[in-house]
Amino acid sequence: MSLLRERLKRLAKPHAGGAAQRADSSVPGETQGDELQCDSGLSSESAGVPFPAGPGASSEPEALKSGSVGEWNNQLPERESNNEWAVCGAALIDTEFGSFVMRRTTYPLGHLHGRYRLGDLDELSGELQAFIEDGQALDGSETLLFFDTETTGLGHGAGNVPFMLGFGYYDRQSFVIEQLFMRNPAEEFAMLKYLESMMPRFTHLVSYNGRSFDWPILKNRFVMNRLKLDDRRLKHLDFLYASRSLWRHTLPSCRLGKVEEEKLGFTRTDDVPGSLAPTLYFLYLAEKDASVLKGVFEHNEQDILSLAGLSVLFSYRLNGVWDAERMEEEELYRLGLWLDKMGKEDLSERVFESLLERPDRESGRYWNGLAGHYKQKGDWNKAVLLWHRAADELAGQSIASLEPFVELAKYYEHRSKDFVEALRYAEEAQRLAWKRASLQRRDAKLKALSDELRKRIERLRDKQTRLDLLEASGVEPHVVQNEVRSRTKARSDSRSTVTQGTMTF
């Protein structure tokens, strides 16, 4: 047991030097490597300030002044040599609701987190409006509250307690991070009361998986402490879902640590994994050694900085700023789909054009997906063009995707009414299905598709035969087409009636 404790303590005390950062971007708003002059860790001017400064000020918060929300006692401790929390850059504060530990860190807006300046969000924050489904206005970066918690477990039950609450917000010319920590469960009430006093200023929450984990747990703690947290007006921006949409197929994991390393250009050094935070907290409860929590404070701080960095990155993407030449085809494809989902159709089209300009051997695998996208949007001209490109590329191959042939058969049968072309593509799809069936074991889906193609071919041949007979009798082409449509509809209605009658019986 003693060996385990020693290992945990070593992990909890990372070496000096903070987190290494990486910069290699030439995109506007992203900084080159020679410009990277970053105070990794805490800013030199205000690192580890031992007293809390609230959302509205750079020193003491309004919530801590007499007569303000919460009626906090204005008794802030001064840094002392015997302050046990000084090793973590924090201090114990006493309020009329109880005590808790706070660590407050201020970063200038010029601070770089990886390749991105925190201050760039000031002019771009309006782009984050795309995350809000009901269109509630986002009134500047100062209305955003970035938050992350460290909990005693991974469940959602009453036994899972957030022992550390981390919050970041923009305050005039700085980005402020406040971390609240409870030394024991008795301090939770005071910690939650402080958070309650902060909330009225903010209209939007920003998190990473906070919508389904952190925030529900936090709301549960308010209920357990008989406090009311009215969050109905708050809108939640959860960046986990955007990260998955963009990078699920190009990154080995969408964990925040991997995303910040690959996309923000920020690499942590000697970081305490979040999975170890509960263990270190329990070790602190057993030994009362504040130093074991230093790494947990720093880990939580970097999480919040990464949320701010992702806000800048997503704002640039939604503003049409990216470097297509440095992106893989898969990332371009996912970016285009994501921009379309976010209501940025023009930007989405720009991305897809960049993708289709690449050589066929690189962009070809995305033709079917893009054609399906345009089909869903009702842009049949682009969809058919891409299906033709895919079909021509795949013609003659032993094992090829059946999708472009099947889709073209459907298009020519139902929309263009060109039964000859529809029959040609349906027969080609059936030929490829037979080849695939001869090379694979029995596949239920392939069998179902083959049966569907057989029925389609029979129907098309029947339509074409009747069309030829009508044309031979001297009937005008448009009359022939109308006759085919009416007969096809009548047969479909008849089959529907029989089916309904059978089901009723």
Image (cartoon, rainbow, N blue to C red):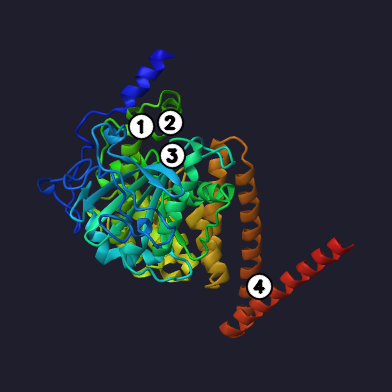
Residue bearing the label numbered 3: 182
Q: How crowded is mark 2: few (under 14 residues within 10 Å), some or many (20 or more)?
A: many
Look at the image and tell me whether residue 385 can be seen.
Answer: no
Q: Is residue 466 left or right of residue 356?
A: right
Q: What element carries label 2?
A: helix
Does label 2 or label 3 sit earlier along the sequence? Answer: 3
Q: What element carries label 3?
A: loop
Given this view, does label 4 or label 1 mark the residue nearer the observer? Answer: 1
Residue at x-position 44% and y-position 56%? 369
Does label 2 or label 4 sit earlier along the sequence? Answer: 2
Q: In which quarter of the image is the N terminus?
A: top left
Residue 293 tag number: 1
Does label 4 or label 3 sit earlier along the sequence? Answer: 3
Q: How far apart are marks 2 and 1 (CA)?
A: 7 Å
Residue bearing the label numbered 2: 281
291 lies above or below 344: above
Which amino acid type is shown beneath numbered disc 4?
A: Arg
Q: Quadrant of the C terminus?
A: bottom right
The quadrant in which residue 30 appears is bottom left
Given this view, does label 2 or label 4 mark the residue nearer the observer? Answer: 2
The quadrant in which residue 17 appears is top left
Which amino acid type is shown beneath numbered disc 1?
A: Leu
* Residue 186 x/y as whole percent: 50, 39
